[in-house]
Amino acid sequence: MFTKILIANRGEIACRVIKTARKMGIKTVAVYSDADRNALHVKMADEAYHIGPSPAAQSYIVIDKIMEAVRATGAQAVHPGYGFLSENRAFAAALEAEGVVFIGPPSSAIEQMGDKITSKKIAQAAGVSTVPGHMGIIADADEAVKISGQIGYPVMIKASAGGGGKGMRIAWDAAEAREGFQSSKNEAAASFGDDRIFIEKFVTQPRHIEIQVLADQHGNTLYLNERECSIQRRNQKVIEEAPSPFLDAATRKAMGEQACALARAVGYTSAGTVEFIVDGARQFYFLEMNTRLQVEHPVTELITGIDLVEQMIRVADGEPLPFAQSDIKIHGWAMESRLYAEDPYRKFLPSIGRLTRYRPPVEGPTERGGIVRNDTGVFEGGEISMFYDPMIAKLCTWGPTRSAAIEEMRLALDTFEVEGIGHNLPFVAAVMDHPRFTSGHITTAFIAEEYPDGFKGATLDPDLIRRVAASAAAMNRVAEIRRTRISGTMDNHKRKVGDQWVVDLQGEQIPVTIAADHEGSTIAFEDGPPLRVTSDWQPGQALVRLTVDGHPLVMKVAKIPMGFRLRLRGADLKVLVRTPRAAELALHMLEKAPPDTSKFLLCPMPGLLVKLAVEEGDEVQEGQTLATVEAMKMENILKATRNGVVKKIRATAGSSLKVDDIILELA
């Protein structure tokens, strides 16, 4: 077995590999750029080697610099993680030439499966069902429009060397095909150094289901069941689960066997994933093969009990797989929520900055018999950099059933404290409560269909509103007792805390009566049964854990005048708790209208203004492209929200912009 391996990656996946290597007694070497000098993976590894400036193109994806680190540290093997060089044939070949083991598949398999056009041809030859499309390289936008029309809209425009949602666009007409071709080409060149594009039919109402395969050097190829990855935004997975709530045993077996057939066809070894698009009739079509460890691998580990990173290392060392296909079972259900540094209230645009607070939930077994796991590469006080993928963490939960796994995820998300940057935690929390998600009736269009105007925050159902109202009333009583004790000390007498209150929550005024004792409070309503609330929360604590009528409730809390800011289940609530007289007077207060910014085109995220599509004096129509901003390797096209005339341009192409910087003004 190896005694030292180098991890040619960063962030949470580098930390993940280090954990397994440590468990196996293997020393680890981290590599880092300028931006990652103080990163968590650098702190966790036994050794660390500097490989250059912050941009990945000058550090993490420069093969010569990684090879220099390998030679300098004497690493016997390299684990590439995912992204960066993980599916780079030249990198795997360079390691092979150096006599260093690549913890992954042979370079020949990477080459064949890394090109989406070649991979589809091989899949067809291996008897794998494939999506109709044009398998040749597209020369220019005119040809893209022509071929798209021949295939029939909608079509998917994809980078041949792509992955992670980059270089992908859906086009529903010729105009979108032309625009999407150029954006995909630009993103592919920036992300992969390869701007080749191809086009295939877009399957409507699809589900994205992938098969995990594992193969050794002794002819054993197995499938470790499937993962459902249909909750996506811009072709980037957001929530994954295993198994799929849609597949039956026969379809699972057929998909697994085809995935293994494809792996055998290219002489595959190590862990890999075969991705399929599955329609409503459970017809499945090959999408691509990822010749690496997937981001969402933890859910497979949770339902199978198999450490995929450990098996990758053992396979790379020449060991046979210690189990057969008949040994692979499905135990319970697992969920994964990807937490990204992106603002869901601003259409999920990237956010960068310092994590002023980062408190993930406690990992391990829960009181309800579930499991919580959090794979991360950040820490409180650390920076989310503009140079890399905006992932903060992968929060995973396991339960004996799908509903149990979802409930564990709800509580874990409500417990997860992240402050200092925009993040998508409220959104994934809202999805966990969405009836369509909980029913399992999902497609890759879920986010586009259920949140067509973006995410505006969740609206709580009546039962949960009542539980939150009872909790806020009980918390307010604790806060009032503390306040009266302090003021009573100053005034030499104690003020009595009343038992009649009105809770203003989500547009409702809810009168309550509190009956408190040493164990907690019983909250009575004007209608319906009372609720019993217990908690050890004290004012000043940022997280409150309560039991309401025997059920757990967790909320993030901050004090505001006459109440609290409470966050849970994707809702961000201003909850006011007033005396009946104060609540009556509040009804006569006027709401202050927010300022009108519709005449400005504001930069929605920190980024680089790549292109201005208009000049001063131009007339523009609603929906017209005005500018292109690049952030975290993704191009974001900004369009007019109303008709108007460009009155003044405030920024120039090439400028670095902050959130809400004015790009131009409309008259």
Image (spheres, grey):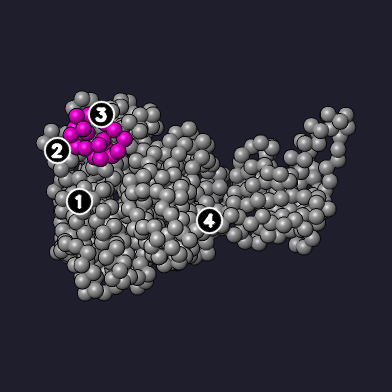
> Which numbered disc, 1 or 2, marks the residue that appears first in the sequence?
2
The residue that label 3 is drawn on is 4
> Which numbered disc, 2 or 4, marks the residue that appears first in the sequence?
2
The residue that label 2 is drawn on is 94
Residue 634 percent coordinates (x, y): 34, 51
Q: Nearer the viewer, mark 4 or mark 3?
A: 4
> Which numbered disc, 4 or 1, marks the residue that appears first in the sequence?
1
- SS for tag 1? loop
33 relative to 127 in the view: left or right: right
Residue 528 percent coordinates (x, y): 75, 62
State the separation of the CA atoms marked 3 and 2.
18 Å
Amino acid found under the numbered disc labelled 2: Ala
Which residues are drawn in magenta?
Answer: 51-70
> Which numbered disc, 4 or 3, marks the residue that appears first in the sequence?
3
The residue that label 1 is drawn on is 194
213 relative to 406 in the view: left or right: left
